[in-house]
């Protein structure tokens, strides 16, 4: 092989990532130049990463595969985003994939960079049999509390699917009043491909909405922090006061408004929540 050939081989099999044919691989192994060894090393790393990703995806699909094998073709994963922010609605998404589907890179949205989430959201929408995004608005959050509002958004996302779900995989706890059979999975966005995909769609949809709301309510930095209680947001809240999309049931907002703490919310069985309004009532 000439140096020019090595340059072409590197472009084809390292930069472009094409599968390395056996004949070319044999020639590279017989070539003693450092460039040939570097190409082989890069290909070996890619093969290892592909095997690792394949194993991760197989593990991530174990709930779906079990249900597909049992005859449930339309398995929906559902998850929410935006429980902790001090402002803006809470979002939820539901996703149904065809049996055997795989999308490399899909993972819990919290583990992914924003650019990766955006790219994966496009891939998920293109590959899904059906997908849906829904919201529960600030007024609903303040009326029924953030926990129940997030569950409401989840039910809306499931109801919005173009194909009815035959079985639902839910991140966290079971959803009350859901007609299809369901399976609750604690930490499901790291254990189920469908739930992880739903977490990505919910997160990207809410982030996009908060960027739009940043223009409507300037000065708070919503486009940067998406309403989460980061120092920049707390400082703007103290300086500007609360705007229309701030959650009045959240402690930091109530403090700025001079409102007293809320009592624990009643639950459906007449008891009270141990942590009223969810974790955001504490210092985040």
Image: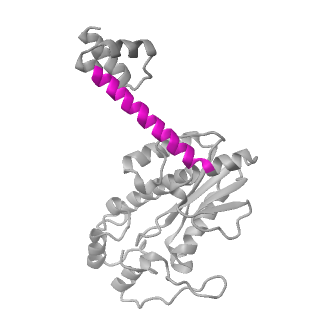
Dividing the picture into quarters, in which one does residue 143 lie? bottom right
Q: Residue at x 32, y 78 (%)?
A: 241
Query: Which image quarter is the C terminus in?
Result: bottom left
Query: Which image quarter is the N terminus in?
Result: top left
In the rendered image of this protein, does residue 189 appear above or below residue 283? above
- Left or right of 251 on screen, residue 159: right
Residue stretch in magenta: 37-62
Number of labels in the image equals 0
Q: Residue at x 57, y 52 (%)?
A: 192
**Residue 60 position within the rendered picture, expressed as x and y whole percent measured from the top left:** 55, 49
Q: Nearer the viewer, residue 253 or 240?
A: 253
Q: Residue at x 28, y 67 (%)?
A: 219
Q: Nearer the viewer, residue 272 or 145?
A: 272
Residue placed farthest to the right in the image? 71
**Residue 184 position within the rendered picture, expressed as x and y whole percent measured from the top left:** 63, 63
**Residue 177 position within the rendered picture, expressed as x and y whole percent measured from the top left:** 71, 69
Q: Residue at x 51, y 52 (%)?
A: 201
């Amino acid at each position: 092989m000439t140096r020019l050939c090595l340059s072409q081989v590197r472009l084809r099999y390292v930069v472009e990532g094409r599968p390395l044919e056996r004949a070319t691989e044999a020639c590279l192994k017989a070539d003693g130049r450092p460039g040939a060894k570097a190409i082989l090393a890069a290909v070996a790393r890619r093969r290892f990463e592909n095997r690792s990703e394949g194993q991760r995806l197989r593990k991530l699909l174990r709930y779906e595969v079990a249900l597909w094998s049992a005859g449930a073709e339309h398995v929906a994963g559902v998850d929410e985003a935006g429980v902790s922010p001090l402002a803006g609605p809470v979002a939820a998404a539901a996703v149904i994939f065809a049996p055997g589907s795989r999308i490399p890179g899909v993972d819990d949205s919290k583990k992914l960079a924003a650019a990766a989430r955006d790219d994966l959201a496009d891939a998920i929408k293109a590959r899904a049999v059906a997908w849906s995004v829904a919201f529960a608005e600030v007024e609903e959050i303040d009326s029924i509390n953030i926990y129940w509002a997030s569950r409401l958004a989840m039910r809306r996302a499931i109801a919005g699917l173009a194909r009815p779900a035959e079985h639902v995989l839910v991140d966290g706890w079971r959803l009350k009043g859901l007609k299809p059979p369901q399976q609750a999975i604690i930490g499901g966005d790291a254990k189920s491909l469908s739930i992880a995909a739903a977490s990505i769609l919910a997160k990207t949809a809410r982030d996009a909405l908060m960027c739009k709301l940043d223009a409507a309510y300037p000065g708070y930095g919503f486009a940067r922090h998406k309403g989460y209680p980061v120092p920049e947001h707390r400082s703007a809240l103290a300086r500007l006061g609360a705007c229309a999309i701030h959650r009045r049931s959240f402690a930091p907002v109530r403090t700025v408004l001079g409102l007293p703490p809320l009592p624990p919310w009643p639950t459906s069985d007449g008891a009270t929540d141990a942590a009223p309004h969810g974790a955001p009532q504490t210092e985040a």
